[in-house]
Image (cartoon, helix red, strand yellow):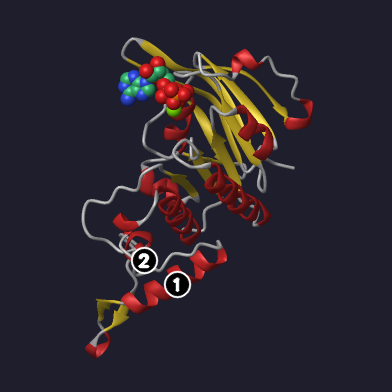
């Protein structure tokens, strides 16, 4: 099976630090690939390159075998790559539906057939559908600022699905969640897998990685240490722990 994502020879330097040094990384549809390593190993940098937030210095990225140059975060989303941020960026009063469709507001035909008003009802209906599918008990017309961290994550996931994401990046999604919320997130992750989505899951918590991941990629000081299927994992845990 061809990986849905393949990153080859990715390098990235910041002043004074080689954050990534010729790193290879791949992920398969319908699987959870965990990305682990100590603080500063380069995990977030690798994912920021994938999500278009940073530009790589060197390397190649292939989606379903086709080479892509990811321009910026919006381009990444259009390519089917979505990132679940820990905190939604909400700078003004925004409803769940507005957040999900931000920048892509559905328009209703105005008088004389011109594309006129934002179709709030239709956006709420579609947002509600996706949230319901995720088992999220969140009203589409609720203000985002009133949601818990876990609920905001679900809104982000709903947004990813509305972009028809094929790859969803979760960078330490559990760090601000309680254990019950983590369980719920894992249920949602299983559902996303069943839909054929590739999940990239970054966590410092080994128990979580072993619970949810199908494969594990390990970075250390910007270099690929190795990757393995979970069943094969006989890992020196010092590679994974927090410093
Ligand atoms: N925007 C930036 N400017 C300068 N240096 C950066 C920047 N982003 C990351 N770095 C550096 O690049 C290296 C890799 O950082 P990165 O955040 O990718 O690590 P990480 O594996 O995600 O670590 P953590 O587990 O702490 O989140 C570190 O040395 C970090 O200080
Ligand atoms: Mg990080």
Q: Which mark is residue 97?
A: 2
Q: Is residue 63 visible?
A: no
Q: Residue at x 30, y 62 (%)?
A: 143
Q: Is residue 106 left or right of residue 215?
A: left
Q: Is residue 44 left or right of residue 233?
A: left
Residue that extends furthest to the bottom in the rendered view of this protein: 112
Q: Which mark is residue 142?
A: none
Task: In this rendered view, identify the residue nearer to me: 63 or 212.
Answer: 212
Mark 2 surroundings within 10 Å by alpha-carbon count, few (fewer than 14), some (14 through 19), many (20 or more): many
Q: Residue at x 36, y 44 (%)?
A: 87
Q: Secondary structure at mark 2?
A: helix
Q: Which residue is mark 1?
A: 126
Q: Is residue 201 visible?
A: yes
Q: Quadrant of the N terminus?
A: top right
Residue that extends furthest to the top in the rendered view of this protein: 16
> Residue 178, image x and y in percent?
50, 42
Q: Is residue 21 above or below residue 201?
A: above
Q: Residue at x 48, y 42 (%)?
A: 177
Q: Is mark 1 within 8 Å of ligand 2?
A: no
> Residue 164, image x and y in percent?
51, 58
> Residue 47, image x and y in percent?
47, 33
Callout 1–callout 2 Cβ contact below 8 Å: yes
Q: Is residue 223 above or below residue 232?
A: above
Task: In this rendered view, identify the residue nearer to me: 118 or 61.
Answer: 118
Q: Where does ligand 2 appear, by image quarter?
A: top left
In the picture, residue 124 is in which quadrant? bottom left
Q: Is residue 232 left or right of residue 58?
A: right
Residue that extends furthest to the right in the rendered view of this protein: 231
- Counting residues from the start of the chain, the first of labels 1 and 2 encountered is 2
Task: In this rendered view, identify the residue nearer to me: 184 or 101.
Answer: 184
């Amino acid at each position: 099976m061809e990986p849905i994502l393949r990153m080859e020879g990715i390098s990235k330097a910041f002043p004074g630090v080689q954050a990534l040094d010729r790193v290879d990384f791949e992920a398969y549809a319908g699987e959870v690939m965990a990305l682990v390593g100590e603080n500063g190993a380069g995990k977030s940098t690798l994912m920021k390159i994938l999500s278009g937030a940073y530009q790589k210095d060197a390397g190649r990225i292939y989606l379903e075998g086709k080479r892509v140059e990811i321009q910026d975060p919006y381009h990444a989303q259009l390519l089917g790559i979505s990132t679940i941020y820990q905190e939604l960026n909400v700078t003004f009063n925004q409803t769940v539906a507005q957040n999900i469709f931000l920048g892509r507001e559905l328009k209703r035909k105005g008088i004389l057939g011109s594309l006129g008003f934002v179709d709030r009802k239709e956006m709420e209906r579609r947002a509600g559908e996706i949230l319901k599918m995720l088992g999220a008990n969140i009203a589409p017309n609720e203000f985002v600022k009133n949601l818990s961290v876990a609920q905001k994550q679900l809104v982000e996931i709903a947004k990813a699905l509305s972009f028809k994401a094929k790859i969803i990046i979760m960078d330490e999604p559990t760090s601000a969640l309680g254990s019950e919320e983590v369980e719920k997130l894992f249920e949602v992750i299983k559902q996303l897998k069943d839909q054929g989505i590739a999940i990239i899951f970054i966590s410092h918590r080994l128990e979580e990685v072993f619970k949810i991941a199908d494969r594990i990629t390990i970075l250390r000081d910007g270099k690929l240490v190795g990757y393995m299927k979970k069943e094969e994992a006989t890992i020196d845990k010092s590679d994974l722990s927090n410093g």
